[in-house]
Image: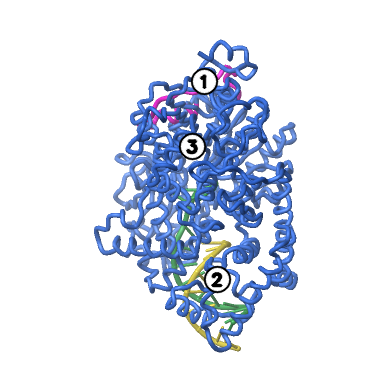
Chain colours: A blue, B green, C yellow
Amino acid sequence: MFQDESSNSPLLQNLNPEQLAAVTLPATHALILAGAGSGKTRVLTTRIAWLLQTGQVSPGGILAVTFTNKAAKEMLTRLTSMLPVNARGMWIGTFHGLCNRFLRAHYKMANLPQSFQILDTQDQLSAIKRLCKQFNIDDERFPPKQLMWFIAACKEDGQRAKDVPARDEEARKKVEIYALYEDQCQREGVVDFGELMLRSYELLRDNISVREHYQRRFRHILIDEFQDTNKLQYAWIKMLAGQGPHAPSDAAAIPGGSVIAVGDDDQSIYAFRGARVGNMADFVREFSVTHQIKLERNYRSFGNILDSANQLISHNTNRLGKNLSTDAGPGEPVRVYESVSDFAEAQWFVDEVKQLVADGTSRKEIALLYRSNAQSRVMETALFNASVPYRVYGGLRFFERAEIKHALAYLRLLENPNDDTSFMRAVNFPPRGIGARSIEQLQDMARSSGCSLHDGVSAVSGKAGTNLRAFVAKLDVLREQTSAMSLREIIELVLTHSGLTEHYKLEKEGQDRLENLSELVNAAESFVSQEGFGRDVVALPVDELGNSMRSPNLNQSPASQGLDANFEILDETLPELLAPDSETGETLSPLVAFLTHAALESGDNQAQAGQDAVQLMTVHSSKGLEFDCVFITGIEEGLFPHENAMNDAGGLEEERRLMYVAITRARKRLYLSHSQTRMLHGQTRYNLKSRFFLELPESALKWITPKNPGFSSGLGASSSWEKHSASGKRSDWASSVFSGRAEQADQGPAAASQRSAAAAHGLRNGTQVFHAKFGEGKVLMLEGSGDDARAQINFPRHGVKWLALSVAKLTIV
DNA sequence: GCGTATGTAGTTTTT
DNA sequence: CTACATACGC
């Protein structure tokens, strides 16, 4: 019914038939299988714009969820460039951002303090450590990190402590700790990331009027990266969409809205943190999805790159089935390089980068992707030595840096003195004579009287008590002083009066930290001066649920005027967090808004942002990005696919999807490389080239390794072997395969005899050999001499074997 | 209570 | 190898 009026719309120009179909879907449930580079974000944003423009929905009826702040921002930016719409009426954001907004709006019903604080992963871990200490939990049996993962996994599955089955003693104990942790968080007025999701889910589940209000409101729900949703997130969506056991009591009064899930099962790479690709199939079944659209036209890469991606991923089973295609032609072949060592690989990479740059490629269009962070080091060294500017993604982000966390801890204590995590962080930093002993006393005190550390201070006697009271008094004074200040003034005052500035001034390596602290002031400043902050914040009318509402004429664009008036405006951006409380008219302080922002958006980590620099990152963090030239390095068995991923059933397939993601990042040119040897944990490892090479189309590849004679028996291998045996240490895999005897063989003259022995049978480390039963393999290590001579050989199809050379029939390839 | 020495464990990660 | 945590001595 909207086709006619919409076909002229400039919004819909230049969409391919599948994209157009997705954008103009009727108001039903649909699954869009969007391949890499198929214009997914464009479809999503155009769909929203089209719905608004054709008057099918008001901004308030839109709920669009993403995983990252970056994706949410991009959606918002693109949308506002398409339509002069006031984006604030819409709920566009991350799962966590939206849940936060929801809980702030209904904090009383959610049983939270209005200014509840959010624990990031660091905070959560220290909260658990604190708890374990208090309850004398054996941290050998129950490592805090594992407890944290356990708790996070429970919450991702929507389980409270009481819902978790406790079969054995260990499980029972873990559940008990989970329950204690929940109590502690509740007492302190803090929530972790999982809690944001779970608590808003429960609020919807347990409160019919709230639930039906939102079910009535959100006519169109759109979910990005649906393959990455976990069980709880899917349940949350189902709830809001009125599907399943919590369908509206009066279905006629609340007609079902539309849920559009956009995802790519081939790019599901977060199963390890609870993502369920199965949600896609469940969605189709449970929502009776009749409209499924595949976006397979790729607008990013040339043919050889896509062929490689397609053929690789075809080795996975249980796919929904999708093949990327392009009109762009085959382009250049995919270049494959084999090096002797990780150092050589790095050198080759740097040389290639230099050549590319000399030929006119801009550095920021060159990306280096690797499976694990540890691989960046060699590469960084090589780039640094060659003075090639580069930027590493990942690692500590701005709001996670120690000095920033310290400053934030003081700020949080101003808002909420009961936040024990922040109290612990700030109490003796900078050092003020409050040591472990005093803290212990205080913790005992607080525990026995069931109060927060802050409140327990008054009961501590002696010198410890004096110091503690001085600290608390200082906080109280700060709170008093800052009560009427601007955010900027508050932070500046806290930085000086906490002693942080002074402390880092005296520290010899403190310069960077001081700069970061002043950057924190800047961050607050720009947060406050965000667009729209200056608008008058007026008391809003309240609807029957206690939700604040605004008149539809207020702050609305012409495009959306005159539409559904029944929507609430509460946005995760600062101006909306400043919306007055529905009952008291009281506004959330800019400080709380800023602290929330700091927790939910950990900030970028790049120091050298904006520079024209080569981009270094893990394959995981490359998802969603694209570059003209991509190098994927370290494509070796054990590394990519990673050995630790091979345990569970779906492990290899997820690794393959990871490789698929990596390949599809490249627009024009793709390099794949692997190395014969690699330093890992201070020891040289001999890696075979990844099985993934065998899964790529030969016709799309071009080996560019120079064919030097004697190349594969390189010096790198034997020299590191000498170092290795001289140290008297064996790597884990060696000792496990060849236990007792290896110890003896390693000591004394045996080690020295290896080279001469090797000469006798003609084998060296790295020699390629053939065995009648095991096939081709590579010599990793040699031991003993004469009849005792043994070789450790890695056979691609049979693994690492120790063979007695007097028995095994080996031929040198 | 604070700074240095030893020990140990080491995929991927956003919120 | 190297980052981090705990343990020890001052």
Q: Please give the chain letter of the residue carrying mark 2.
A: A
Instruction: Name the chain letter of the residue that bears numbered label 3.
Output: A
Mark 1: which amino acid?
Answer: Ser
Residue A246 in the image: state x and y as whole percent: 35, 38
Q: Which mark is residue A659?
A: 3
User: Measured along the vertical axis of the image, is residue A785 above or below residue B7?
Assistant: above
> Which is the main secondary structure of the residues drawn in magenta?
loop
What is the chain identity of the residue bearing mark 1?
Answer: A
The kind of residue tagged 2 is: Met
Q: Earlier in the sequence, mark 2 or mark 1?
A: 1
Q: Residue A325's mark?
A: 1
**Residue found 31% across the figure and 57% down from its top:** A162
Q: Position of residue A700 (x, y in %)?
A: 52, 25
> In the drawing, what numbered circle is on residue A720?
none
Asked whether A181 falls inside the magenta stretch, the response is: no
Give the residue at mark 2.
A424
